[in-house]
Amino acid sequence: MQLSRWQWVFFLAGLAVLLLGGILLFRGNETAGVQAPEVFLPELPEGLPARLGDMEFRVERERRKVMAVSISSGEQVWESDGFDGWIVPGAAFPLDVSPEGNLWVANVGRKRLEQLDPQSGAFIASWVPEEAFSGCCNPVRFAALEGGRFLTMEKGKRQARLYAPSGKLLDVIVPDLSASEFHYEIRKTPGKIYLIDHQSDFGQVRTWEFDPHE
């Protein structure tokens, strides 16, 4: 039996559809078990806890308290409300001890840093930059450096910045942090400070080294 021209056209079109379906099915099976490679954080040293002598300083976000705990006994030494209470709208409630032994806490809702007496928790002073922190709450991460300088990671502007004791902006260390503050991290070690952006807006976890002695 001979096929007409139109029958040949329909036959060949159907054959092409079958072949294309087979190719797609093969490719689907070929990649079904393949997953995107995981992004691993480079091997970095652990950050130092906020300690001074026998005391370790901590925050309790739920109660809006800063406290000192004796390392040797595990007992609480003091707790503090700062100058006029801590405003903590989100998860960020960082603190740090400077190389000179000054205890600083971020009162993020009031957009300032507050210095507390490490022995009693009493308020000593506050610090703000010349140009006020933007947004509802900042800085979401910070490190207290020698000489009264501060290294911050800020949402809103989404930048890591270096400030002088006067509040003057010295440098923008990272101009383009990713969108979420929850992925920012500062690890402070004796020789280096590591700024980490865990969110993969840029396709990978990004890290920066900062020499606090420069």
Image (cartoon, rainbow, N blue to C red):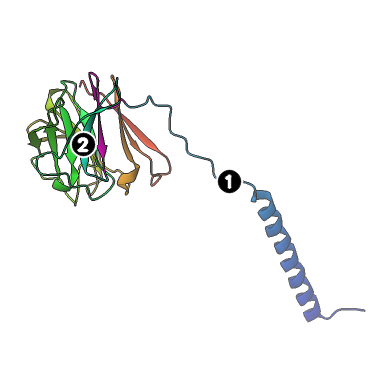
Picture coordinates of residue 213, whole percent (x, y): 21, 20
Numbered disc total: 2
At label 2, which amino acid type do we have? Val
Q: Is residue 51 magenta?
A: yes
Q: Which residues are magenta?
A: 48-61
Name which residue lies at 30% across and 45% down: 181
Proximity of marks 2 and 1: CB atoms separated by less than 8 Å: no
Q: Is residue 60 above or below residue 101?
A: below
Task: Say which residue label 1 marks.
Answer: 35
Question: Residue 66 — which label?
Answer: 2
Residue 2 sits in quarter: bottom right
In the depicted view, which residue is nearer to us: 171 or 68? 68
Name which residue lies at 71% across and 63% down: 21
Give the Cα distance between marks 2 and 1.
Answer: 44 Å
Picture coordinates of residue 42, whole percent (x, y): 43, 30
Q: Residues within 10 Å of mark 2 (few under 14, many from 20)?
A: many
Picture coordinates of residue 211, whole percent (x, y): 25, 23
Q: Quadrant of the C terminus?
A: top left
Side of 53 relative to 15 (left or right): left
In the depicted view, which residue is nearer to us: 4 or 39? 39
Q: Quadrant of the N terminus?
A: bottom right
Residue found at the far right of this picture: 1
In the depicted view, which residue is nearer to us: 65 or 209? 65
User: Can the viewer see residue 167 in this picture?
Assistant: no
